[in-house]
Image (spheres, helix red, strand yellow):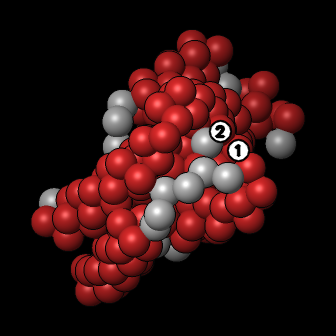
Amino acid sequence: MWEVLTGFDPAVLIAFIAAGLLLNITPGADFVFVSASGISGGPKVGMAAAVGINLGIIVHVAMAAAGLSALLIAWPLAYDVIRYAGAAYLIWLAWQAWRSGGILEEGHAAGSAVRALRRGFMTNVLNPKTALFIFAFIPQFTDPAIGPVGMQIVVLGAIFLVFGMAFSLCLGAAAGAFAHVLGAKSRVLSRLSALMFGGLAARLVWE
């Protein structure tokens, strides 16, 4: 693995890292989910959602390295099945958030963090667009002359994950801190989270 890492042209690695950071700071499904989780439950919950999201990315990187993501391109029905399953899951999250009383209690934070991690993981794994993006994006920076392409995808995926994790953890913590400042408006924040989850579901279905 080290030989593969050192075999990359430094300029290629810099371009890959810069592109990955640009993609992470561009608001998308992961950005909205982590923000909504932080707003709903505070910094711990936002950061747990970030960890869950990135655990999902590990699955997609592994799929890309194995070439399994090509199935979603070759078999459109598989894409649609996963897409609608992801949208249904997001709608369920929206309904749960809408019904929530919005009370951000300290004792509730630990349990919510576990759920946020699980939901972040499931949301990302059930998003075929994430798989297709990783499968299309990372291989552009590989070079067969360096070594096995699968190993290069693993190395580049790890780099993408490290920077993505750092950004999303900061985003989740910041969203949580912002929510704490709003204090008593927790019910409003829960409703806002519900609308964000619902919007993600609609986007997943219609785009």
Say above or below: 173 vs 108: above
| Residue 204: image location, x then y, percent | 25, 64
Extreme right residue here? 2
Q: Quadrant of the N terminus?
A: top right
| Residue 34: image location, x then y, percent | 51, 46
Could you tell me if the residues under marks 2 and 1 are in contact, i.e. CB atoms within 8 Å? yes
Please report the residue visible at 47 percent of the width from the left and 63 percent of the height from the top.
101
Please report the residue visible at 77 percent of the width from the left and 57 percent of the height from the top.
107
* Location of residue 112 (image quadrant): bottom right
Q: Which residue is mark 1?
A: 44
Say above or below: 120 vs 38: below
Q: Amino acid at mark 1?
A: Lys
Element type where label 1 sits in the image = helix
Using residue 62 as the reference point, say whether residue 125 is left or right of it: left
Extreme left residue here? 206
Depth order, front residue of 103/39: 103
Extreme top residue here? 11
Element type where label 2 sits in the image = helix
Which label was assigned to residue 43? Answer: 2
Q: Amino acid at mark 2?
A: Pro
* Location of residue 64 (image quadrant): bottom right
One can see residue 55 in this view: no
Which label was assigned to residue 35? Answer: none
CA distance for labels 2 and 1: 4 Å
